[in-house]
Image (cartoon, helix red, strand yellow):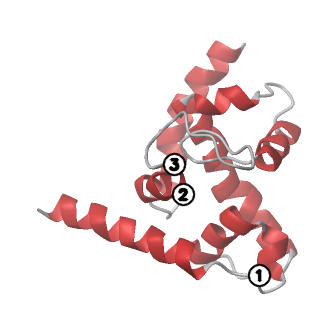
Amino acid sequence: MKLILLIIIILAIFVTNALCEIDERAHIMIESSGNQYAVGKDGERGLYQCSPIGLRDYNNSHPECPLTPDDLFSRVWSHKVWNWMVTVMIPRRLEFYQVEITDTNVLFAYNLGCYALSTGKTNPRYVERYYEAVGKYNNKEGE
């Protein structure tokens, strides 16, 4: 069952990547420095440093194929969870909290949580580091 879903996910990655405006490479670099086996101080795991709460939310929305924390060390599964979070879950919650859905707000919500963002809490340094990384990748592509 997991193998079939994995194949579907790989195909879906190419389709859904166009929906997300967040630069995935930059996000990986600020979350894990490209280390797919990274573990954060609060239990975050993988390239995208998905939190235990994020994984729980993903599993609640995908009961047909629940993931374990160690599944987040897989580039494919980690990407699937991250992509769902930034293109589906976070925008839905921002809409619920009546927060404008922008790339910056999605990044803040990924880092802080949607509720925290709705109360006015932000992390400017996190987003600043993200845009620095985006600029680094865009400059390399232009060379």
Which marked residue is nearer to the observer: mark 1 or mark 3? Answer: 3
| Residue highlighted by disc 3 | 32
Closer to the chain start, of discs 2 and 3, is: 2
Q: Position of residue 105 (x, y in %)?
A: 65, 76
* Mark 3, secondary structure of its residue: helix
Q: Residue furthest front?
A: 41
Residue kind at label 1, given as amino acid type: Val
**2 and 3 marks in contact (CB < 8 Å):** no
Task: Determine whether, in the image, residue 102 is placed left or right of residue 95.
Answer: left
Separation of disc 2 and disc 3 at Cα? Answer: 23 Å
| Residue highlighted by disc 2 | 19
Picture residue at 82% right of the left edge, 66% below the top: 93
Q: Position of residue 60 (x, y in %)?
A: 88, 40
Q: Where is residue 139 in the image (x, y as percent from the top left)?
A: 21, 67
Q: How crowded is mark 3: few (under 14 residues within 10 Å), some or many (20 or more)?
A: some
| Residue highlighted by disc 1 | 99
**1 and 2 marks in contact (CB < 8 Å):** no
Residue kind at label 3, given as amino acid type: Ser
Residue kind at label 2, given as amino acid type: Leu
Q: Is residue 87 above or below residue 36?
A: below
* Mark 2, secondary structure of its residue: helix
Q: From the image, which quarter does the C terminus lie in?
A: bottom left
Picture residue at 84% right of the left edge, 42% below the top: 56
The one of 13 and 46 positioned closer to us in this rendering: 46
